[in-house]
Structure formats: structure tokens, C-alpha cells
Amino acid sequence: MRNQWVFIFVIGFGVLGNWVSGFEFDETDFHFNTTESISLMEASSSFAAAAGGGAPNPLLVGLTLIPEAAAKGAACLDGTLPGYHLHRGFESGANSWLIQLEGGGWCNTIRSCVYRKTTRRGSSKFFEKQLAFTGILSNKAEDNPDFFNWNRVKVRYCDGASFAGDAEDKANNLQFRGHKIFLAAMDDLMSKGMQNADQALLSGCSAGGLASILHCDEFSSLFSGSTKVKCLADAGMFMDTTDVAGRPTLRNMYEGVVTLQGVAKSLSPTCINQLDPTSCFFPQNIVSHIKTPMFILNAAYDSWQVVSSLSTPAADPNGVWKACRRNPGNCSPSQINFFQDFRNQMLNALKGFSMSKQNGLFVNSCFAHCQTERQDTWFADDSPVINSKPIALAVGDWYFDRLSVKETDCPYPCDKSCHNLLFS
């Protein structure tokens, strides 16, 4: 039996969420607009992590702003300094570094970016002064067996383009400097010992998972050939597909992000030579070109995409998908078939990637989003598994070359270990 416990927190929009064998939210209290709002799932995941993510007495790590960032042109949307949270490694992990890029949606219009800079997703004025380090960031061996004593870093996300933009809008006082934030953070961490790393892992969740894909080879290039460097993308496999009305909702939103924030110059040259910039913001067109070893961790029915790009209220004006969107147990057979097709598209997009011996894969058939940062999904007595292997051990086996990891789950509803995200 899965542990039944309650987790209550407040989202900035006034939403109350509670955990009972999965997160539950009141969808009516939140306006889901993929083009003009920060995802509730990402907000909830971050608040869950900030409050401990299910781990008792989590480690709280203070904020460090990067004073040299301004001189390098790196700034949050509102022009404030970017920052990160660093907990030093110890003993055998003293020279190993894990960098976690924070997620939190995107902004694709002037209006949405102007709003975003009044939040912690666009201004360091609103950053939490401390974050709880849980899951892959935990300092406890029993919660994080392979990375607990590494130098662990959470890089804050305050640009709205997965750390990839490089432009500005002077009229609206907007700085789109995500790529420079990434570089400034890496420079600062290199000066604090990361340049001497024996081992390094770039990871990220959601928009941060996409960022870890976009910047994987760039991150690897920072180190000498003697450093073991790999990358992990959690819930970053955002698919270029159509919604329940047959519309390319996510592509339309990404086109705004790429165009407004000047993302093209940060994208894969190999991809750009073949496809348009918006296509090169989608992982399915990038992952096979990455030279650095990478691990893709994703729920086959990614909750963010289910709610915010596949079955949005705008695509479902008559509310046919409303109950299904809130809880997969309410879906009709035809609606489940739609999600099975989405899963198949994801698996097909990963075929070439998974053929490489150096890469790892863990795609579980859950309605979930971001599974590395929450303790209950990363490594716990009842955490999700495929073939009896939890996510933390799968990632560790792959990183340390103990075993090849290419885990693909059977289709929904066969996996009873899922921690599905539900909406009340």
C-alpha cells in the first residue's frame, strides 16, 4: 500500500493543493493558458520541493546572487541579478558536481513576460532565500544514494526561455538573457571549484529539463577531457504534436518564445542547418545530435502536456475532456487512445536516441511531471519503478556505468507504482 499523507501548500495564484496518493488541485481556481501563464504543475512541483518534497527535515540551502553577472550582461527579466543555491560536497563527493536547472514554464508574449517579471520566475527580488534540497539534491544517503555527497546546485530560473534567450525589449524594460545567465552561473561555479571536478552532471526539471538538453554539449565543453560529464533531462521531452482539436498549441507557444527572446542563436547548429528555429526548440529534433551522454526521464503521459498543451480548455470549449484532464480514471476509451498515441509519438521520437550505448532512458507510464526533485518519486519505499528499479537507482546505474538503462514501461494503466498528478 502506498503511504497516504497530506501535503498542503499555497500557489501564488491562490490555489490550495493537497497530496493524497498524488497531488490534487482545484483546476477551477487556476486559469490554464499555455501562452500567458506559468504552469501550475511546475509551480506546485517547486513549492513541493521548497517545502520538503515529502522528505522529513529537509536540508535548507541559502541563496547566492552572482554579482559579476551584470558585467557579463546576464540578468533576470526585470534586470535583477541571477542566482543559485549551492550545498558543498564532502568526503568522496568533494570533487563531484551536480547542477540542477530550475524549471517554471516560459513566456512568449510581451504581456506574459511583463507579468512574469513580477514573480520569482522573472526577478530575483522574489526568489526564496532558502530552498529545501530533496530528491536528487538531498544530502542524505538513504534518500539520494549516489549523489548525496556531491556539490549540489540549484540554478534559479528567471528568464522564461529555458536559459536560451539573448535579446531585450527596452520599451518594456525586459531583459531576455537566459543564455548569459547560464554562462554566468557556470563561470561563477567554475571559480568555486567546479573547474577541478572529477565528475559532473547537468540536470533539470521541465523547462529546466529542456534547458539541460539545449545546453548539454555546451556544459561538457567547460571541462577537460579527464572529467566525466553527463546530462539528465527530467520531464523535458516536450512534443511537437497537435492537441485534441488538431491544433499545434505548444508549437505556437514555442514560436513566440523563440522569436521574442532571440533563442535561435543558442540552438543546435546541426539542427538549425536542417530545420526552422522553433523546431529546434523541441527535444525530439535535438536529442539524437547530442554528443555528451544523456539520460531522458519522462512520464509517458506528461501531466504538464496533458493539461497545458494537449487538452486545454481552449481546445475543449464544450468541456468533453474536463473530467479526463483532471483524472485519467475518468477518461473514455477513445480519450485513453489519444494519450496512447501521444505516448507512441514520444517513444518513436526517442528510438534513435535510445540506440546509443552511452544514453539512458526511463519512460514510465504515469500522469506525472518532474520526478527527480520530489523525494516520493525519486527514491522512497513506494516510489515509481520499472522492472522493480526506482528512478534514483536507474540514474545511478547509468551515470556510473554499472548497467545499461533503457527502461520503457508498459502502457497505462498497467503501472501501479505511479504517483499520478490529479486535479480536483
Image (cartoon, helix red, strand yellow):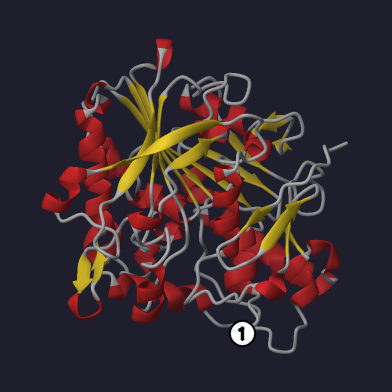
Of the 4 image quadrants, the one containing the C terminus is: bottom right
Of the 4 image quadrants, the one containing the N terminus is: top right
At 23% from the left and 25% from the top, the residue drawn is: 225
Quarter residue 150 falls in:
top left
Residue 393 drawn above or below residue 418: above
| Outermost residue to the bottom | 318
Viewer-closest of 4 and 370: 4
| Outermost residue to the right | 1
Q: How many marks?
A: 1
Residue under label 1: 314
Q: Position of residue 132 (x, y in %)?
A: 53, 37
Q: Is residue 349 left or right of residue 335?
A: left
Q: Position of residue 407 (x, y in %)?
A: 63, 38
Using a 10 Å C-alpha cutoff, classify the residue at mark 1 as few (fewer than 14 neighbours), some (14 to 19) or many (20 or more): some
Q: Does residue 200 appear in the picture of this structure? A: yes
Q: Position of residue 240 (x, y in %)?
A: 49, 68
Q: Position of residue 198 (x, y in %)?
A: 31, 19
Type of amino acid at the residue the image marks with label 1: Ala
- Badge 1 marks a residue whose secondary structure is loop
Viewer-closest of 76 and 260: 76
Residue 240 drawn above or below residue 216: below
Quarter residue 412 falls in:
bottom right
At 36% from the left and 67% from the top, the residue drawn is: 117
Q: Is residue 280 left or right of residue 196?
A: right
Q: Does residue 23 appear in the picture of this structure? A: no
| Outermost residue to the left | 71
Q: Is residue 65 left or right of residue 409?
A: left
